[in-house]
Image (cartoon, rainbow, N blue to C red):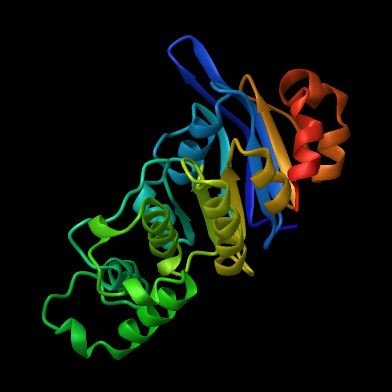
Amino acid sequence: MTYSLELKDLRKSFGKTDIIRGVDLAVNAGERIAIIGPNGAGKSTLFNLISGRLAPSSGEVLLNGQRIDGMKPYEINRLGLSRSFQITNIFPKLTVFENLRCGVLWSLGYKYTFLRFLSNLDDANERTEELVRQIGLERKRDVHAVNLTYAEQRALEIGVTIAGGANVILLDEPTAGMSKTETSHFISLIKHVTVGKTLLTVEHDMGVVFGLADKIAVVVYGEVIAFDTPAAVRANARVQEAYLGSSVADAQGAGH
């Protein structure tokens, strides 16, 4: 069986310090996976290994059956995997429309050509207008990114992340710093824009985790100690002891 994303005995050490210690994970196409764990568990390192920012010490990362471990991030992106970061990563002096169009151009084959007027690229402009609508920023279409609210900037980054047509999306703490109202709206946005795509997200807000994920991977000290449905993870005694603790009851009430 070919998985959308598969990790096989993935390991990463820095000197004598083992950070990722033999992670195995198999994600089906279209699944939404939340990766949770205490600070220092290795979640961000895992994302960096998957997206090519770090090379593993050993093990394999497969994207749609093809090994990508050791590839450069842009090579992995062109194979259909895109990620966002904890810190908003957009072009502040470009408008919403221009930011999104930057993400669209390569996927449509325009690459590094400077011989065309962008206004004449009907397919790119139509796809960009669609993205503006998808992320709900029609009224801010021509506003420079620097002048958006924090939540709007995060929505724009989600748009840029999906602009290239990737079928595997990695979101690193997408709701960090948001109010409860903004978070609720953002969960709906993520669900909307990732329909039919495979999603992995690192998230600390248990309400977001249990409200968004089909399955949850719990990482503790560089190992996946549980990978199951939200209901099964809630009931897992080892997970409760290692990470969730008393927050399980709160998460049950927050899940939606």
- Give the residue at the far top of this rendering: 16
Residue 142 figure quarter: bottom left
Residue 241 figure quarter: top right
The image shows residue 74 at horizontal and vertical percentages of: 35, 53
Q: Is residue 249 above or below residue 38?
A: below
Whether residue 122 is visible to the viewer of this picture, yes or no, is: yes
Residue plotted at (48% across, 37% down)? 49
The image shows residue 125 at horizontal and vertical percentages of: 31, 84
> Which of 162 and 64 lies nearest the eye of the viewer?
162
Instruction: Left or right? Give the position of 135 relative to 101.
Output: right
Q: Is residue 132 above or below residue 72?
A: below
Q: Quadrant of the N terminus?
A: bottom right
The image shows residue 4 at horizontal and vertical percentages of: 64, 57
Q: Is residue 136 above or below residue 29?
A: below
The image shows residue 127 at horizontal and vertical percentages of: 39, 81
Residue plotted at (41% across, 34% down)? 54
> Which of 166 and 68 lies nearest the eye of the viewer?
166
Whether residue 64 is visible to the viewer of this picture, yes or no, is: no
> Which of 230 and 5 lies nearest the eye of the viewer?
230
Count of all numbered marks drawn on residues in the image: 0
Residue plotted at (20% across, 86% down)? 119
- Give the residue at the far left of this rendering: 115
